[in-house]
Amino acid sequence: MSEARANARTGEATLLRMLQLSSIPSIEVGRLVSEFWGVARKSAGVAPVRPNPLGYSSIGEAMLDHTFTLAMNAMTGIPDRAQMELQRTEMREASGLFEQQGWLDEPRAFHRDPPAVRDWTLRNESAILPSRVRFQRLSFASEYEPWAGIPGSDRWLSRAANKTSHAYVLEHAERDRPWLVCIHGFGMGTPSVNFTGFAARWLHEELGLNLIFPTLPLHGLRGTGRVSGGELLAPDYIALIHSFAQAVWDIRRTISWIRARGAQRVGVYGLSLGGCNAAMVASIDDDLTCAIAGIPVVDFPRVARDNAPWVLDWYHDRGTDWNLLSSTMRVVSPLGMQPLLPVDRRFIFAGHADRVVPPHQARALWMHWNQPDIHWYPGGHVFGFMSRDVQEFVGRSLQQAGMLELVQ
């Protein structure tokens, strides 16, 4: 690349970044003002599954969600024209390949059955939250390989840290306990954050379950950014497909590892991004005991479009082809696959005040899953799922699915 061209690209990137950062606060403030206006008019702005309008008590959590979204938008990269054209080209190539292989009609076929884990390490570790918790860290080579011909595969596989799968294990001495696979959300992935977010002490010590916490691609020890999972915020949509596909692959290999240890009952429980992964695994693994999708994001293109900075379409001659992105990402969406669990062993919870993953996401999964038990709590995304009523719903769900029969 010539010096003049490099300087031009640097100047373009700087301009885009300035426009992006200047626009974010006004967008989020505008959304928050809209929230207040909706409450004042006694309208939640989003029709819930069951009537329960958003009230002033929930505005604080909605405000926290808007702050979180503001921070994430500030971290999100803005592609220059060359990057934008590369994204469009790669998505067109991927869409053509997926259609040719029949994966858009049958997304489950996109996900190959992974081999069993034959070589692993198990290390004793501990974390303080606030008292010390002792656990084990399972590590093994992911061995994930994209299908031949998928664009961006070389870029994806060049991430060295992501090639090793890690999972944190809380196991009882009695091997016949049921296992709950806890799949974290974006920004999580470290032991202290995972154990706190999932109320691990309660699940492990009070309910008596064995727990395992797989680390999603580019999170925790598998990432290199300052924020766990932050690399997913780069302007690279094809990388999202690789990320979701590898996540399902690694989770299934983790499940095969615990089954090899004698696990008779295995459930999956995911939060946010992990809720999507839990729902996908429940559409591929036909021997799960239950699936709990908490505050699930199931239509990622719609969330991305809702939060895309206006500068993207204003500055570029052609913005993101959202219809193409949505159809191509069908291979990594639970809405493209049918769940294999009976409806009475599928569970969903979500927040009315959630403004990171809006309620329409959980409602879409609820409809697709044939309207299973769903719990709507009045809080938001960042902390609302840690409320006691959500914990009680999770406990009832595990009981209903038969996950607690062997431990009580």
Image (cartoon, rainbow, N blue to C red):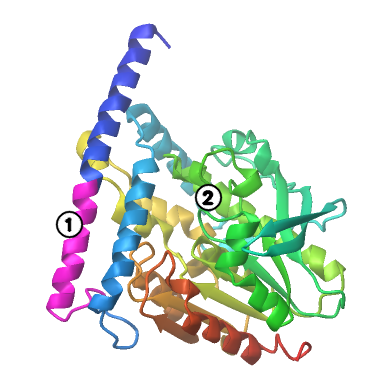
Is 42 part of what is drawn in magenta? yes
Q: Residue type at mark 1?
A: Gly
Instruction: Pick whichever of labels 2 and 1 is earlier in the sequence.
Output: 1
Residue located 36% across and 34% down the image: 79
Q: How many marks?
A: 2
Q: Quadrant of the C terminus?
A: bottom right
Query: Toward the viewer: 5 or 403?
Result: 403
User: Along the horizontal axis of the image, is 408 left or right of 183?
Assistant: right
Residue under pointer 2:
241
Residue located 70% across and 85% down the image: 403
Q: Position of residue 298 (x, y in %)?
A: 46, 65
Residue 173: image quadrant is bottom right
Residue under pointer 1:
30
**Looking at the picture, does residue 51 appear above or below residue 70?**
below
Q: Considering the numbered disc 1 on the image, is that residue within a helix, a strand or a loop?
A: helix
Q: Considering the numbered disc 2 on the image, is that residue within a helix, a strand or a loop?
A: helix
Bounds of the magenta segment: 25-46
Residue 350: image quadrant is bottom left
Q: Position of residue 42 (x, y in %)?
A: 16, 81
Name the residue furthest top.
3
Determine if residue 267 is in view. Answer: no
Query: Toward the viewer: 208 or 230?
Result: 208
Q: Residues within 10 Å of mark 2 (few under 14, many from 20)?
A: many
Q: Residues within 10 Å of mark 1 (few under 14, many from 20)?
A: few
User: Along the horizontal axis of the image, is 359 left or right of 121?
Assistant: left
Is 293 part of what is drawn in magenta? no
**Looking at the picture, does residue 90 appear above or below residue 185?**
above
